[in-house]
Amino acid sequence: MLNYISRRVIFALFLVFAVSSASLVLARLAGGDYVTESLGIEAHRETVEQARARYGLDKSIGAQYRDWLGRVMRLDLGRSLLYDRPVRDLVPERAANTAILAITALLFATVIGLPLGVVAGSRRGPGGIIPAAIRGVSLVLLSMPPLLTSLFLIFIAARTGWMPIAGMRSPGEPATGFTVDLLRHLIVPAGALALPLAAMFERLQAQAMAETIGAPFVLATLARGVPRSRVVWRDALKASLRPIAAVYGLVFGTLLSGSFVVEVITAWPGLGRLMLDALRARDVFLVAGCAGAGSVFLAVGTLLSDAALAIVDPRAAES
Amino acid sequence: MMLRSFGLFLLAVAVVAAGGAPVLAPHGGDESFRTLLNAPPTMPQLRDETGRWHAAFIYRWTRVNQLEQRYEQDRSVRVPLLWFSGGRIVQSADEARAPLLLLGADSYGRDVFSRLLFGARVSLGLAVVAALGALLLGASIGGLAGYTGGPADDFLMRASDFVLVLPAMYVALALRAVLPLVLAPRSVFLILAGIFAIVGAPFFARGVRAIVRSERRQDYAVAATSLGASHARVLTRHLLPAARGFMVVQITMLVPAFIIAEATLSYVGLGFPDPTASWGTMLHDASNVRVFADFPWLLSPAAAMFLVVLALNLVLERVEMKVRLKPDTTYR
């Protein structure tokens, strides 16, 4: 077990390091740099040279990467050229917003999807209207990735005025902390992320449940006179959690991808929007910082889900 | 079974719409009507004001407020529809003043319906080409890894696991951002297809490797080898066909993902340039709060995407059940 966890931690560290290095190099390789993007093509040659020297963009990729590595070791991630602020201050702020969004969505999806999956999967035979309805809704939602759900929810919000369309906090409200205003702003983006995910959880859980419900141990427990609801919600549920636990690790990547779209459409000030701005402006240090933060999020998520899988099914830790 | 037929029907509609765009669309994809910016749809009518029946006709829009772009139907003149003329199935008889706008016009006064059809060619074409590219790349990697085994296998699988863990959207975004932001549509098509193929290849590689590894020891593969078939022949003629079912399922799963990915990249301005009609660039036009309240017809590419993805999901459900009967192909 300890061996398994330490191997996963090493992989996580490697992931963070490789992703941020690769994105720094990729962003440097791109045609044009921050200076050409911000000053425009008509800027005077000398001005361009001076600006390059000031930002350290006149060095070769190798030299710049070495400098950056040296500073990263001292936890200095460089300075964002676009926002003129240290990347170390800028990124955690935005990453926290993305984390709020993603974790709320994951919570929503699990709380909605899992019980519905149990209900839909635990019927024997052809089932009734309820499982069929759940299945139908899931099928529709599975065909609506976050890009479409966010447009759909904004459409509803714009037509009814029930909830804010975009942004994270209304002007005049406190800028930090969990407020009612923040929760209201969360409905559209978190809902957009959660709905397709909930549908996926429902389908997975329903399939796993349908397989478990036919197992001999379930029949034996029922035969002993244990009430059906208790067998379904306690014994069969526990035995059928493995597929969802296994998929939780991959879900963090999906959540990050999905939150990028949702953040752009609903103007949620998260990591995705920051990364997009940084990529467009060729702000190399900010790109590397965002990618690093994203991979930390991903690595922590993968670690947690590996741990969850090992708890649900100890066999997973052995392979 | 009925659901699957419905899925196949929707897919057929999409393919016909994309293939027949030049004939089916009343207008060209970039033809714009300057006086009809954001005009609502012109619904074909059969009865006029007084309740008399006519051959299908439309009423023209007259602008009542230029600033707010509000329009009113001009019920005094019936504009008949012209069928099978000028190389198109249907058009309005008075194209210049009263064009047929089945799904309204966008903010440049272009016909949304026609752009939807032309956009289907770009969006669906890109997704299919990219999925086939991913299949080619992934099956080569997976086949090689599964067949040779050893350190090459280790390396290839570690690499594809690594790509799988990363959020696909960010990988595509980072790769796209490396290249110049503004490019010709043709280059964008090739670049996006290449990027999507790279991001999608690991999905094929993992499954194909697992299947090739287990099939390699089967009698028929050993028999082929002992009859003197070369490695390349055993792999391509005998082992890869065993992964056929898996490949079909993966393609059906990747195509919708690629449709959405194109739309996302174009939406944020890193996909096709604006004049090109694709479902993504059309959504980009719709990225304005007023659209949701006043010009909802601009969201029709979102509806089109939903229907195509739904169709593929409906078809897939059936395919998945068929494949599950073979134990070695249920590889996730």
Image (cartoon, helix red, strand yellow):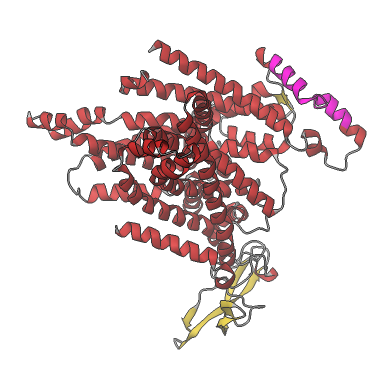
Residue nearest the observer in this picture, A36 or B293? A36
Residue at (48, 51) in percent of width and height: A152
Tell me where residue A128 appears, x and y as whole percent.
Answer: 20, 50
Which corner quadrant holds the C terminus of chain B? top left
Residue B247 shown left or right of residue A242 in the figure: right
- Asked if residue B147 lies left or right of residue B318, the reply is right
Please state the extent of the stretch shown in magenta in the rendering: A49-71
Q: Nearer the viewer, residue B48 or A260?
A: A260
Instruction: Please provide percent x and percent y for residue A242.
Output: 31, 29
- Say if A59 sits above or below B305 in the image: above
Left or right? Give the position of B161 relative to A247: right
Relative depth, front residue between B211 and B310: B211
Looking at the image, is A150 positioned above or below residue B36?
above
Q: Is residue A71 toward the left or the right of residue B17 in the image?
A: right
Query: Residue shown at 72%/49% (left/top)?
Result: B183
Q: Position of residue A10 (x, y in %)?
A: 51, 16
Would residue B332 be seen by someone viewing this image from the given angle?
A: no
- Tell me the residue at 44%/45% (across/down): B237
Above/below status of B102 relative to A269: below
Which image quarter is the N terminus of chain B in?
bottom left
Residue A305 location (% of width, % of height): 41, 25
